[in-house]
Amino acid sequence: MQEPTLGALIAEKRRERHLTQAELAAHFGISDKAVSKWERNLSKPEEKIMPQLVALLDLPQGYLSHIDATRSSGGRGARILHLVRREFLRIAATAALLALGISVALGNLSVEQAMPPVAISTALFALATLCRGGL
């Protein structure tokens, strides 16, 4: 038999205790929409409230430790990797702009020759700065 999802388990235990989503949310100082997302498996509770959630809803410890292990395998590390990639792109674009500027100043490149790479480097820098998705 398949283990219920975390969302299904939260919904089941919440109903057993005759709590509404709003009441459960108020206990943690969050919105009822957040609880709704948990129950529909669109998001998961923050790690800092998990111990309180376990105690309040009497969730099984073993099931939640499995969920935490799954979460930690991709969450924080993936965010750090994304930031490193984004910062690397910003640094590379800045280095290219500096090199082009120095080349023009030394007379190794004309302004006309430098303009296309300057435009590309500037666009990459702007993209890396503004992008919130997965570069």
Image (cartoon, rainbow, N blue to C red):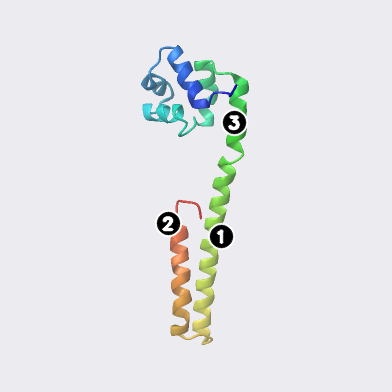
Q: Label 3, on which residue?
A: 68
Q: Secondary structure at mark 2?
A: helix
Q: Label 1, on which residue?
A: 88
Q: Secondary structure at mark 3?
A: helix
Residue at 45%, 51% in the rendered image? 132
Q: Label 2, on which residue?
A: 130
Q: Is residue 103 above or below residue 41?
A: below
Q: Is residue 98 above or below residue 10?
A: below
Q: Badges 3 and 2: C-beta atoms under 8 Å apart? A: no
- Measure the alpha-carbon separation of dots 1 and 2: 14 Å
Query: Residue 18 at x, y = what percent?
Result: 41, 12
Q: Residues within 10 Å of mark 1 (few under 14, many from 20)?
A: some
Residue at 54%, 86% in the rendered image? 108
What amino acid does circle 1 point to? Phe
- Measure the alpha-carbon separation of dots 1 and 3: 30 Å
- Which one is in front in this view, the residue at disc 3 or the one at disc 2? 3
Q: Is residue 94 above or below residue 31?
A: below
What amino acid does circle 2 point to? Leu
Query: Residue 11 at x, y = what percent?
Result: 45, 21
